[in-house]
Every structure is written in structure tokens, then in C-alpha cells.
Image (cartoon, coloured by chain):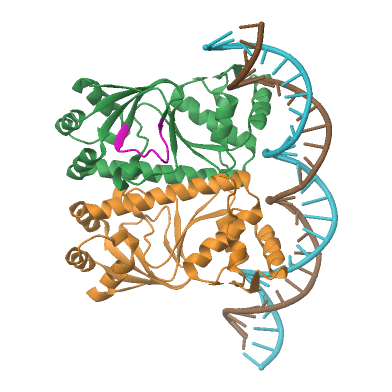
Chain colours: A orange, B green, C brown, D cyan
DNA sequence: CGAAAGATTGATTGCTCTCAACTTTAGTGG
DNA sequence: CCACTAAAGTTGAGAGCAATCAATCTTTCG
């Protein structure tokens, strides 16, 4: 990990793109930006984990940070793949508590970091930011609950389709993920994911290379319309 | 639903018991209490649902409010059983947006309601409250993610055990739930829940009546210790 | 008393995990 | 530059858990 002092413009331009920073006055954002440093991580580097808690507000600038939780049996549940403009530790910024999440760089990445206390003070001065944060947390809760429902009543195929669809909306049709990473997102095993991907390839929906997937027929990933209501 | 003007003391004494209101100065809480009204609901009455959004901060005083989500197929996922001192709609208080959750009275219940805008203004004046709220939301996220992990690697028996254990910690050893309600909490079917409960009864762990369960051997519900670390 | 909600139990099916063996690819160090 | 190793991908066989479907019984309540 390397740390840099960035130009204010570099940080504000990230803020402009971040959903968390919407509806906050540009002068205020400039003030906040002046408190930021840039951190650079290499692929697979670990940013934070339970015993090494996070004392910064962290916003992803480039690359992708994986936030996941490991079960006692070693299974990995990825619940957030944060890309540019997304924050990775909103709760502990407020509470200062450690969480059981592991944050690691899924690719070479840079993030903007701001001291927790300073960020908190700023948030309480700019209440729209608090509202945005609560909104984001609410979406996280909804997402997890949605996932629980899907595990109950949908098959692995459907879950994988939804994962691929979501990823392609976020990163475009050329995805750089291994089958194992997809399995962690869809809550299944590598083997099952691979089997299904193989089937999709045969049907011409995707193309595969080692560690990457090209989506050829995005329409095949759309959730079916709900009839009859 | 009936609405009452409560005494300030009634509301502050609820605040005293509520985790959300910890570390906030008593005078401030008294101010907040003066804005509150009490609402009374009968069992199975619906407080809020998607098309009927919530414009109040709502804190359960007595009884139990079930917050759940229904899938397209009609399955119910209960993700919060709010009892005394718990809030039921923290996110929409901030965002004003509607959510897909359904809030219904699981038993006859009373809640304390405060106008959204007034509550928001108070929260931004008393930042500890915001911190408490974010903390609570964080716990909700963790809980849901934990549940996803458990669905992946644990059997239905284990999930039911955890549900029973959690409920008995919250409500004591005499639980008033139907097998269907337990199934909604453990993400399984009524039949499977019933089968497992029947087995538990045979082994003397619980006693059952219609709509109620008495836990005879709480120690049988404890999660097994993790060895070898 | 009738109806609705809940409880019970049996039989069956099938999805997906697990285990296992093997191939291919990428990366690394001598 | 090549050999070696680790990571990723592939495919098969088998087992088992729990969902589903179904039928019956019991309790509660209006």
C-alpha cells in the first residue's frame, strides 16, 4: 500500500461521481476533499479486517474492493463489490466499532481516505450526507434480504443469472471474475457455478476465458416479466 | 388503530429502555418525548406497507411488530420482530422513500410515533442518536448476511435452533409463535419446521401447544462451541 | 355448528452439494 | 527459456436434505 497527497480536483471529481455525495454544496465538498489522502493497493492486498479496524472513511476511486465475510468453515460471502464512487465501511465510520468484514482489493485499486473523526464532524455539518449514507445502508439491507428470499425460492441458475446481470450493469459486458468469485456472490459452490456457466456458453449466452466472461446475449439475463397482475 | 396523547413520562420511560436512545441527555429526550403520540394496534393490523409509506419515526412500546417482505410467490421473509424499544422504519425516516417492507402487529401492540421531519431535526441536533441509528442499521446488515451464510452451509435444524435461541433470549422461554411464523424466520417451510419441532418435543427439548412453544432445555439450543483455534 | 387456521405425517422428487480425478493456464524461479 | 507449481477450469458419479404435494386431524372462534 502506498499513500499520496492528491490534488483537490482529483478528489472533488470523484465526489461528483459518487452517489453518496449528491446534493451537497460544491464548496463544502471542496473542504472535505482537502482532508483526503489517496491510497493505492495491489490486487489481493487486504485493506481491513476484523482485528485491524478501519479508522477512515474510504471511498473507492479506481479498481474494485471486495467486502466479504468468511464463515467458520471458510466459505466466503461477498456482499459488496465496491467500485468507483462507493464507500466500503460506512457503519464503522460512525460507530468506531470493528466489524467482521474483510475488505480486500479485487483488482489493483486506489481509494480516497478521510480521517474518521473529521469525516464525522463534516457529516453532522452537512446533513444531506447523513441522509445519503442512511439511504445507502438501507439499500444494503434490502439487497441482503432480497438475496435471502432468492436463496429460498430460486434455483442456483436464477441466482447466477441475477449476479451476472447485476455485474454487467455495473461493469459492462466484459467481466473479469473467476467462477469462484461468482459463486461467492451467488451463494453457491465453484463447481455448480462452473457447470451452469458451461451450459450458458453452450447456449451462446456467454463466452469464457480464464478469469473472464463476455456476455453475448444480455437479454437472456433479464429477469422474466411478471405476468397477470 | 387508535391514537392517544401520552404523558411525557410514559414516553421517556420507553426511551430509557431503548437502545436507540442511549447516551442522549435526559432534557433532550424530554423535548423529543413531547412530540410523540401513542398508537394502538390490534393483532394482525397492518401499520405500513409499500403503497402506504411511513412518515413517522415509530418505536414499539408494547407488543410486537413484524417487519417482513413478501416474494412474488407469496413467501414471507420476516427480517425483524420489533419488541419494546425497537424502531421499525429507520431508513425511511431519513430518506422519505417508500420501502417494500410490510409492518404488521404480530400481537396487540402500542407504538410511539413522532413526525418524520421533527424527528430528523432532533437527530441532527443530537448526533449521538444518528450514531445509534447507524449502529442499529449495521447490525441489521450483519444479521442478514449472517443469515445468508447460514442458509448456505447450515441445515434447517440448525437454523431453527438459532431462531428459537434468539427468540427465547428476547422473549423468554415461553414463546407465542406458530410453526409458520418460525418458518418465516428460519427461511424454511411450515412442514419442515413442524417436523423438526416434533422431533424436538420427542427429545424433551420443547413442549408445544397451539401457537406456543415452551423451551424446556435451553442448553440444547446453544450453538456448539468452536474448537481448535 | 361450520369454517378457517393450524398441526401432523407420509411419500416422493430433484436439486445441488460433495468428493474426486483430471486438464489447462499462468506465473515464477533457476 | 524451461520446468515446476499453483490456481482455475472441467466433468462425472452419488448421496442426501428438504421442498412439494397430499391427506387427515384438531382447535378456535364467530
Left or right, A130 with reference to A140? left
**Tally of numbered tags:** 0
- Quarter of the image that includes the N terminus of chain A: bottom left
Viewer-closest of D4 and B39: B39
Above or below — where is A113 with respect to A128?
below
Identify the residue at horizontal 20%, vertical 20% (top origin).
B7
Q: Is residue A114 left or right of residue A219?
A: left
Inspect the magenta stretch and tell me whether residue B48 lies in it: yes
Q: Residue at x 58, y 48 (%)?
A: A150
- Residue in the image at 23% along x and 67% along y: A33
In the picture, the quarter occupied by the C terminus of chain A is top right
Point out the stretch of residues depicted in magenta.
B47-58
Residue A106, percent across and down?
49, 67
**Looking at the image, which is closer to me, A138 or D23?**
D23
Q: Is residue B65 magenta?
A: no
Residue B199 appears in the rendering: yes
Q: Position of residue C26 (x, y in %)?
A: 60, 79
Residue at image coords 29%, 45%:
B94
- Going by the picture, which residue comes out furthest to the front? A228
Find residue B113 and report its horizontal and vertical position in percent: 28, 30
Q: Is residue A44 visible?
A: no
Please name whichever residue, A208 or B104, is drawn nearer the observer in this view of the structure.
Answer: B104
Q: Quadrant of residue B220?
A: top right
Residue B192 screen position, x and y as percent: 67, 32
Q: Is residue A2 left or right of residue B72?
A: left
Amino acid at each position: 500500500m502506498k499513500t499520496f497527497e492528491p490534488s483537490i480536483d482529483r478528489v472533488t471529481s470523484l465526489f461528483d461521481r459518487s452517489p453518496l455525495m449528491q446534493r451537497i454544496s460544491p464548496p463544502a465538498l471542496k473542504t472535505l476533499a482537502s482532508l483526503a489522502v489517496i491510497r493505492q493497493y495491489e490486487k489481493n492486498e487486504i485493506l481491513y479486517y476484523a482485528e485491524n479496524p478501519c479508522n477512515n472513511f474510504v471511498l473507492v476511486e479506481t479498481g474494485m474492493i471486495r467486502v466479504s465475510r468468511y464463515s467458520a468453515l471458510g466459505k466466503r460471502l461477498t456482499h459488496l463489490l465496491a467500485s468507483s464512487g462507493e464507500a466500503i465501511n460506512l457503519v464503522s465510520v460512525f460507530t468506531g466499532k470493528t466489524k467482521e468484514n474483510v475488505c480486500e482489493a479485487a483488482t489493483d485499486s486506489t481509494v480516497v481516505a478521510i480521517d474518521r473523526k473529521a469525516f464525522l464532524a463534516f457529516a453532522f455539518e452537512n446533513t444531506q450526507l447523513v441522509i445519503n449514507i442512511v439511504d445507502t445502508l438501507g439499500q444494503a439491507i434490502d439487497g441482503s434480504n432480497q438475496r435471502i428470499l432468492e436463496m429460498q425460492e430460486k434455483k442456483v441458475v436464477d441466482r447466477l443469472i441475477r449476479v451476472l446481470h447485476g455485474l454487467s450493469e455495473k461493469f459492462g459486458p466484459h467481466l473479469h471474475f473467476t467462477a469462484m468469485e461468482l459463486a461467492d456472490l451467488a451463494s453457491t459452490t465453484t463447481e455448480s457455478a462452473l457447470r451452469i456457466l458451461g451450459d450458458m456458453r453452450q447456449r451462446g449466452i456467454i463466452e469464457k476465458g480464464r478469469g473472464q466472461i463476455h456476455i453475448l446475449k444480455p437479454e437472456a439475463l433479464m429477469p422474466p416479466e411478471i405476468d397477470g397482475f
